[in-house]
């Protein structure tokens, strides 16, 4: 049997912070640019994401930055950790990459970094990945999520042709977290207040009178909420799997390292449970 060719090591992109902007009390925008983005490309996906690399405090890596060398020569606890963020916008002409970060004070890693980072600082990241863009052949679109999915939902809405039929639901903590989306689709902003994350989102989607015709849906956010919405769409309404982009971006009580380590198993269990309960099409 022929051996598989060795996987080509992925080379991180290197960019500089061009500017930052606080969009809402809990959403920070960071725009990246520089010569390091000369070979960066993004396709038509509206859920493109990159994986930012953060080294532990006090650890300095040799230049030029080489992730494979770091993993070979440094102890594991000194390896960079990754945090995944959706590409809000990629301007190929200006070669500027826009990322939006949810910030909750000093909680987490990437949020506090985004709140304090200054123009000129170097950022390294992997990517982009991504798989979804609204199918213009669909009769209508459903987009639903919380703050973590807001950048991808906004990007999807802004990509839709004028006059497209779409229902968009975004759950945020309160009215101060609403953002302007450049689309003729009216976004339904759901204000969580003191209620559990995702509860209002599930209620709103369940209350929607679904239009006739083929649906193409994008549903992302907190994992337990997404699980409930997947049950509605796949089990109760029998929407074909290929017409759904649906996954948990995060899980309450887990940091990204813990969630990413368990996400595949979680999704497999949920799919097995719900597909087993779904009537045969």
Image: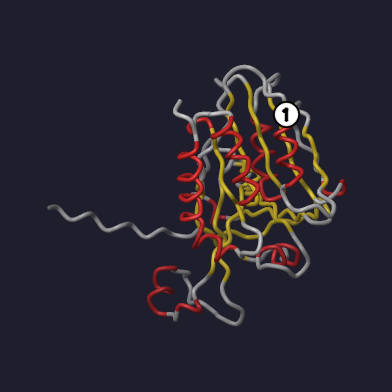
Label 1: element kind: loop
What is the x, y in percent for residue 106?
A: 75, 70
Query: Residue 131 appears at what percent x and percent y?
Result: 50, 40
Residue in the picture at 40% in, 69% down:
68
Q: How is the image coloured?
A: secondary structure
Q: Nearer the viewer, residue 183 or 116?
A: 183
Q: Position of residue 243 (x, y in %)?
A: 52, 30
Q: Residue at x 58, y 28 (%)?
A: 237
Residue 122 placement (x, y as % from top left): 61, 65
Return the residue nearer the eye: 122 or 160: 160
Report whether 5 appears left or right of 57. Answer: left
Q: Residue furthest left?
A: 1
The reply, left or right, for residue 55 in relation to residue 144 is left
- 83 above or below 139? below
Depicted 265 relative to depicted 214: above or below = below
Residue position marked by numbered label 1 in the rendering: 208
- Image quarter for residue 213? top right
Quarter the C terminus occupies: top left
Instruction: Establish if 115 lies above or below 74.
Output: above
Q: Residue at x 60, y 32 (%)?
A: 217
User: Which quadrant holds residue 250?
Assistant: bottom right
Category of crowding for the residue at label 1, using alpha-carbon neighbours closer than 10 angstroms: few (below 14), some (14–19), many (at least 20): few
* Quadrant position of residue 114: bottom right
Q: Nearer the viewer, residue 188 or 20?
A: 188
Number of callouts in the render? Answer: 1
């Amino acid at each position: 049997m022929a051996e598989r060719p060795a996987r080509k090591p992925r080379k991180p992109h290197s960019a500089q912070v061009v500017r930052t902007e606080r969009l809402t009390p809990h959403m920070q925008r960071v725009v990246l640019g520089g010569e390091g983005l000369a070979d960066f490309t993004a396709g038509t996906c509206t859920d493109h994401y990159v994986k930012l690399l953060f080294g532990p405090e006090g650890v300095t890596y040799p230049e030029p930055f080489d992730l494979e060398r770091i993993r070979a020569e440094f102890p594991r606890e000194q390896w960079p950790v990754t945090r995944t963020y959706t590409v809000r916008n990629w301007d190929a002409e200006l070669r500027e990459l826009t990322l939006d970060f949810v910030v909750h004070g000093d909680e987490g890693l990437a949020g506090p970094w985004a709140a304090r980072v200054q123009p000129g600082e170097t950022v390294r990241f992997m990517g982009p990945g991504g798989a979804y863009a609204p199918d213009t052949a669909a009769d209508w679109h459903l987009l639903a999520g919380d703050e973590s999915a807001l950048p991808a939902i906004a990007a999807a809405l802004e990509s839709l042709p004028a006059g497209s039929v779409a229902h968009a639901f975004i759950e945020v903590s309160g009215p101060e977290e609403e953002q302007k989306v450049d689309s003729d689709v009216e976004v339904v902003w759901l204000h969580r207040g003191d209620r559990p994350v995702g509860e209002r989102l599930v209620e709103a989607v369940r209350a929607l009178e679904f239009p006739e015709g083929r649906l193409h849906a994008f549903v992302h956010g907190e994992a337990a909420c997404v699980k409930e919405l997947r049950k509605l769409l796949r089990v109760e309404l029998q929407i074909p799997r290929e017409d759904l982009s649906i996954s948990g971006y995060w899980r309450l009580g887990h940091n990204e390292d813990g969630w990413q380590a368990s996400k595949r198993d979680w999704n497999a269990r949920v799919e097995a449970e719900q597909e087993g309960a779904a009537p045969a099409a």
